[in-house]
Image (cartoon, helix red, strand yellow):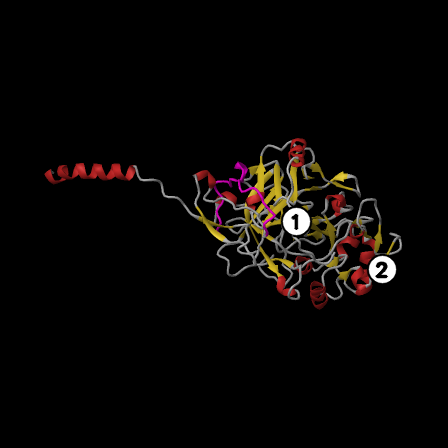
């Protein structure tokens, strides 16, 4: 008893010392958007120490490209704080377990369009090939584009220097006209493989065209291989529609009906059910209320999507203004917005030494050497969920696969999906409160834009 009493002061001192020790932080890793060095656009993996439990152990880096002329903001907004349950691992997390039973991601009912999660509207659309059409998004004079709102699925990715381009995949619907049509990129070969699709494009650089022909000789639709181009949109696959103030490279449009006729003639008009997306009518549990998401490709191109509860859709704004489709005269919309972080690698090695242009390789495939899967953000029904993307097999036609931290599928709402590809989430912000776009437009008008990088490929 005496010994115990003699030890009491020591025990009390020990407990007091432990009480004042700082709480140990949990560390995580995120891929930064800033290219590693002057010759590589690969993300850099950096340890990030959280500032609070609410930050869930992570912060995001910015989307800065190579080159001294691009000066994005390095200050993340408060809306970048991920939810406290988000972890960059495949550790099972009950919070993110989807409550509805999904359709997909690897098997689907008959007559089910795996791009939209809906039945095909008719046998013709069920049986025809997925058609990827490259559509310009820069300079602003090319807007509004035509036919985008009839695409089942759209990928938006960086063509060069922060300038984005659309790869719109058509299957369910056949717009009378799409465009303006622009050049192909390395990334398009991944889409052709994922969706066993034909590619419609205006042209491309010689090294990329050589790769296209070596890998997909009968799936290409382009004036560069001799497909007809006239000034009559009723007479050929491609037609020119001049407009005052619009350079010639922005005047090429395509006729989808004739694209599918050409595919039939070449023996490539075969329906294919791409695997990867999972769909549910009701959203998964645990989502964050988000009505506004803004994506900035370091000051050169941006996209804002705002949720419209009346229609259950997301509406697009670009440069602070509503972004319209000239075809149906409606604001561009989607049922789902998906943002994925993908490694970007510069490929000057494909071009002769001394060339003043190069290709950007967007590596949309599984990376065995990576210690973690790359991040994905999914918005549907006014809710935001965080998880990861993967593409387990690059060769067998497996498409984009979205998963939570416990490897359960992140589900999409049946309908149209827009996938935005970024180098990192540092320049992606979201909020429950929708931004006043008029005020945003005024602010942008007072802010000078950086000069794009001098990277040219094709037209």
Give residue 125's position: percent from left, percent from top: 77, 53
Q: Which residues are magenta?
A: 67-89
Q: Residues within 10 Å of mark 1 (few under 14, many from 20)?
A: some
Q: Relative to the observer, which residue lies in front, 306 or 44?
A: 44
Give residue 264's position: percent from left, percent from top: 81, 61
Q: Residues within 10 Å of mark 2 (few under 14, many from 20)?
A: some
* Image-based side of 90 in relation to 279, left or right: left
Please name the predominant secondary structure of the magenta segment in the image. Answer: loop
Quick check: can you spot residue 11? yes
N-terminal of the pair, mark 1 or mark 2, is 2
Is label 2 in a helix, a strand or a loop? loop
* Image-based side of 37 in relation to 226, left or right: left
Q: Which mark is residue 386?
A: none
Q: Which mark is residue 228?
A: 2
> Mark 1 — residue?
452
Give residue 278's position: percent from left, percent from top: 62, 50
The residue shown at (47%, 40%) is 55
Quick check: can you spot residue 412? no
Q: Is residue 357 above or below residue 434?
A: below
**Quadrant housing the C terminus:** bottom right
Q: Relative to the observer, which residue lies in front, 70 or 359?
A: 70
**Quadrant housing the N terminus:** top left
Contact check, label 1 and label 2, Cβ < 8 Å: no
Is label 1 in a helix, a strand or a loop? loop
Give residue 421's position: percent from left, percent from top: 62, 50
The residue shown at (59%, 37%) is 290
Q: Is residue 34 magenta?
A: no
Q: Is residue 80 magenta?
A: yes
Q: Real-space Cα distance between discs 1 and 2?
A: 33 Å
């Amino acid at each position: 008893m005496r010994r115990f009493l003699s030890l009491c002061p020591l025990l009390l001192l020990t407990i007091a010392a432990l009480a004042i020790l700082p709480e140990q932080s949990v560390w995580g890793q995120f891929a930064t958007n800033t290219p590693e060095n002057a010759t590589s656009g690969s993300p850099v993996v950096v340890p990030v120490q959280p500032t609070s439990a609410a930050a869930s152990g992570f912060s995001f880096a910015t989307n800065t490209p190579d080159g001294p002329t691009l000066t994005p903001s390095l200050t993340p907004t408060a809306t970048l704080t991920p939810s406290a349950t988000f972890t960059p691992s495949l550790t099972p997390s009950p919070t993110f377990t989807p409550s509805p039973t999904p359709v997909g991601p690897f098997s689907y009912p008959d007559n089910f369009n795996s791009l939209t999660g809906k039945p095909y509207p008719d046998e013709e659309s069920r049986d025809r090939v997925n058609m990827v059409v490259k559509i310009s998004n820069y300079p602003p004079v090319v807007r509004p584009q035509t036919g985008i709102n009839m695409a089942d699925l759209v990928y938006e990715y960086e063509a060069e220097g922060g300038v984005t381009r659309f790869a719109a995949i058509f299957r369910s619907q056949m717009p009378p006209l799409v465009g303006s049509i622009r050049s192909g990129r390395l990334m398009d070969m991944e889409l052709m493989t994922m969706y066993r699709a034909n590619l419609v494009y205006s042209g491309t650089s010689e090294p990329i065209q050589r790769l296209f022909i070596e890998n997909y000789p009968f799936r290409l639709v382009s004036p560069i291989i001799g497909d007809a181009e006239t000034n009559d949109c009723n007479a050929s696959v491609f037609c020119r529609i001049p407009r005052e103030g619009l350079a010639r490279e922005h005047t090429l449009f395509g006729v989808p009906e004739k694209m599918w006729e050409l595919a039939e003639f070449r023996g490539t008009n075969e329906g294919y059910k791409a695997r990867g997306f999972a769909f549910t009518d009701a959203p998964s549990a645990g989502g964050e209320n988000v009505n506004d998401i803004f994506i900035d490709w370091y000051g050169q191109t941006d996209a804002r999507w705002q949720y419209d509860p009346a229609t259950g859709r997301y509406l697009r704004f670009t440069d602070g203004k509503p972004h319209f489709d000239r075809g149906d005269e409606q604001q561009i919309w989607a049922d789902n917005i998906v943002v994925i972080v993908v490694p970007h690698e510069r490929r000057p090695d494909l071009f002769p030494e001394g060339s003043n242009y190069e290709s950007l390789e967007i590596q949309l495939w599984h990376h065995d050497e990576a210690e973690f899967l790359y991040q994905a953000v999914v918005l549907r029904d006014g809710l935001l969920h965080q998880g990861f993307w993967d593409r387990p097999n690059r060769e067998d036609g497996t498409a984009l696969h979205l998963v939570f931290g416990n490897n359960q599928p992140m589900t999409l709402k049946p309908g149209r999906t827009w996938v935005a590809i970024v180098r990192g989430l540092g320049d992606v912000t979201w909020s429950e409160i929708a931004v006043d776009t008029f005020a945003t437009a005024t602010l942008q008008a007072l802010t000078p834009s950086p000069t794009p990088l001098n990277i040219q490929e094709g037209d």
